Amino acid sequence: MYDVVVIGGGVTGAFVLRECVKNGLYACMLERENDVCMGQSKANSGIVHAGYDAKTGSLKAKFNVLGNKMMPKVAKELGVKFRNNGSLVVAFSEEELATIVELKARGEKNGVEGLKIISKDELIKLEPNISKRAMGALFATTGGIICPYELTIAAIGNAMDNGADLYLGFETASIKGEYGSFELTAKDGRKLTAKIVVNCSGLNGEKVANLVGDNSFTLGGRKGEYILLDRESGDLVSHTLFFTPTKKGKGILITQTVDGNILLGPTVEEVEDGETYTTSEGLSSVSSKAGEMCENVPFYNTITSFAGVRAYSDRHDFIIEESKAKKGFINCVGIESPGLTSAPAIGEYVVNELIAALLPLKGNDNFCPVRKPDCFFKNLSDEEKNEIIKNDPSYGRIVCRCEQITEGEILRALRENPKATDIDGVKRRTRAGMGRCQGGFCQPYVAELIAKELNVPLDTVTKAGAGTEILVGKTK
């Protein structure tokens, strides 16, 4: 029997799981997909928010500020790229100038440090490509950027390296029993037992809560569409640029990614399901708004577009609490923006406050918080590269030319926790296929490596799980 079972393999569940093993709890994670980080955690802006936007006194404000302060250390421990590039909320009218003054005051009440209002001249010095219509900005110096799927995968992998278990393809169909003896059954019939259940299942959080008779909240979904520009356009901006928020929302943002690309988006559209397709209308909206923020946006350098759906609750705040319907069942849902930033702090709170009130925390003197970066070889010196190649020749073979990813890094992604089993899984862990050609050159080679490593026929290798096979058979 597990002490704790975490349902949902996104970034929030990742840090709950990691904090469990850090505190000596026997824990596991259940994920219904064939890999972790397959929901809203894989397709978001990757922004480490400063914390000025959330309503003072809300859980969003509390955990945003705490998570922002934790992120540099967490990223270093997990070998994840993080950059404190700062963010700018740009004002285009007198009314918006007044709004950013209010945002500054709210941020200071929330405990955000390093907020300041800058003039148009100061803004242009920081961002030469900003629209000349801009009149000033709120500069949040503690804002940053991170890769959301790198962070999620690394946190789960670190938890597994320290003793946590992961069950993939486990779609929870029923939860019976009570605190101390929950029995969870998957659609395929697999069963396991746990003393405590933590519901971190994103868009499915309401359905999972309903399994224990908890009808205390409802969740909705909002789809956001994005455009990604090649690294060749990486000098368009250096900070994360936001429009001044209105009653209709924050609008799109323009930011560098930690890998030097430029990200534009997202749109906001209410959706009934989790479909993550892009539309011509959505992408046109992103392009139009980006053109209002910056001059000469190089849309000709677009290499891909994508969409993600994020869950929000009818409480318009995070829901992080033990269910009143079932003792020992903890809801951690409605974790929309700034959920990525808040995740490390949420993990600590769930374990050190909510779980600790039910189970004694033992501590774990053997817990190792450090994990080696997944994508690292191209950043080494020639001497370091040669030393690694001498010990493992697979690092001397480049598979992805655009991103300079080696065979050794791909094999490592197929062998280390949590193991990749398909092409997109390798892509998220190593960036093989994320460059300008979007896998046009390296995808066949990656597929061959997967087939050989997993000892499966090549025509069974998938892009992203069952139904996405890339080959249908031999031609001759």
Image (cartoon, rainbow, N blue to C red):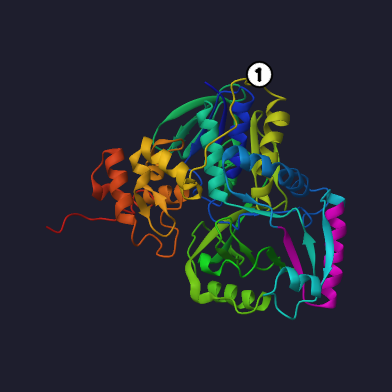
Any part of residue 98 in sight: yes
The x and y percentages for residue 312 are 65, 53
The x and y percentages for residue 236 are 61, 70
Q: Quadrant of residue 197?
A: top right
- Outermost residue toward the front in this view: 383
Q: Which residue is mark 1?
A: 362
Q: Residue at x 39, y 45 (%)?
A: 410
Q: Residue at x 51, y 36 (%)?
A: 157
Q: Quadrant of residue 128?
A: bottom right
Q: Is residue 466 above or below residue 122?
A: above
Amino acid type at circle 1 is Lys
Kind of element beneath mark 1: loop
* Callout 1 crowding tier (Cα within 10 Å): few <14, some 14–19, many ≥20: few
The x and y percentages for residue 164 are 52, 28
Q: Residue at x 62, y 21 (%)?
A: 364
The x and y percentages for residue 420 are 41, 42
Query: Which of 445 and 343 lies nearest the eye of the viewer?
Result: 445
Name the quarter where the C terminus is drawn. Answer: bottom left
Provide the residue span drawn in magenta: 86-108
Q: Residue at x 53, y 75 (%)?
A: 299
- Magenta span has 184? no
